[in-house]
Image (cartoon, grey):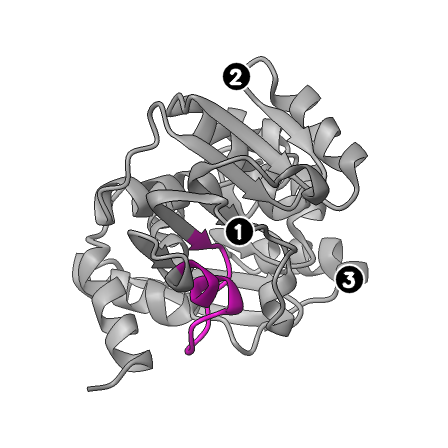
Amino acid sequence: MKNIDQYAVFGQPIKHSKSPRIHRLFAEQTGENIEYTAREVPADTFDEAVDQFFAAGGKGLNCTVPLKELAWRRAERLTERARLSKAVNTLAQQEDGSLLGDNTDGIGLVTDLTRNHGITLTDARVLILGAGGASRGIIGPILECKPSRLLIANRTVAKAEQLTEDFADIGKISACGFDHLPGQQFDLILNATSASLSNQLPPLPERLLAENGCCYDLAYANEATAFVRWGQLQNAGHSLDGLGMLVEQAAEAFYLWRGIRPETRPVIALLNAERHPA
């Protein structure tokens, strides 16, 4: 009997994770023989847990909060997008036993925006709210789409300015505090703050969103987040949460591990139907 290849997601907390369900659906769809589990792993035992997982024959890991920076340090090789983001959400064991670190968050977001929702990033005016790890993971892939401008707004301006320095070689990027947003307009506003986790909103002025512009919250929940509701009140062309990004980044990890790209739209549709039953 052929062994079942083992994969997992590490994080803390992890009970809420939809990743095992998503990868189970991918495996059923593609006929891949894998098992994917969720494991509660605190930061102070991360290295030990990684050692044990791969020593027991594990093939690949996803890492979520608060482990992405630790995974970045742990990886022995990095993709370019992981190197720039200084965070890793996917570890893949290579044939020589080394660990490759990748960050699939940004490409997952871009794929959801452009392919699933038809949102154009090229020449768009893009605003990212927040300058933490979530922002760092998406900046590179967004800049590669060549927006006309990308502004990072954060309460602590120095953190946003650090991001502009790190990514300046890729494209046009600038930084400001929330108090400098009045009078500006954007075609796409991305909420990468943690405010949605407590049902809060960053301080956003009126008329920040251009006519028919789009809002996207990297967080997701069964009910509309505060930022998604704000976008709806601004008459956004789309006001979306991060469920599609979650599925798309998972598909990118699955492809890295298995060399097969699963169909994501049926999975997104199923998960949406489950949280919004008719």
Q: State whether residue 79 appears in this view.
A: no
Q: CA distance from mark 3 to mark 1?
A: 45 Å
* Quarter containing the N terminus: bottom left
Amino acid on which disc 3 is placed: Thr
Q: Which residue, given by chain and number where applicable, does mark 3 sit on?
A: 45
Locate residue 224 relative to residue 201 in the image: left or right: left
* Separation of marks 2 and 1 at Cα, in angstroms: 31 Å
10 Å crowding of disc 2: few (<14), some (14-19), many (20+): some
Placement of the C terminus among the 4 image quadrants: bottom left
- Residue 222 painted magenta: yes
Q: Which residues are magenta?
A: 216-231
Residue denoted by label 1? 206
> Which amino acid type is marked by label 2?
Ile
Which amino acid type is shown beneath numbered disc 1?
Glu
**In the displayed structure image, the side of residue 162 where residue 264 appears, left or right:** left
Q: Is residue 76 magenta?
A: no
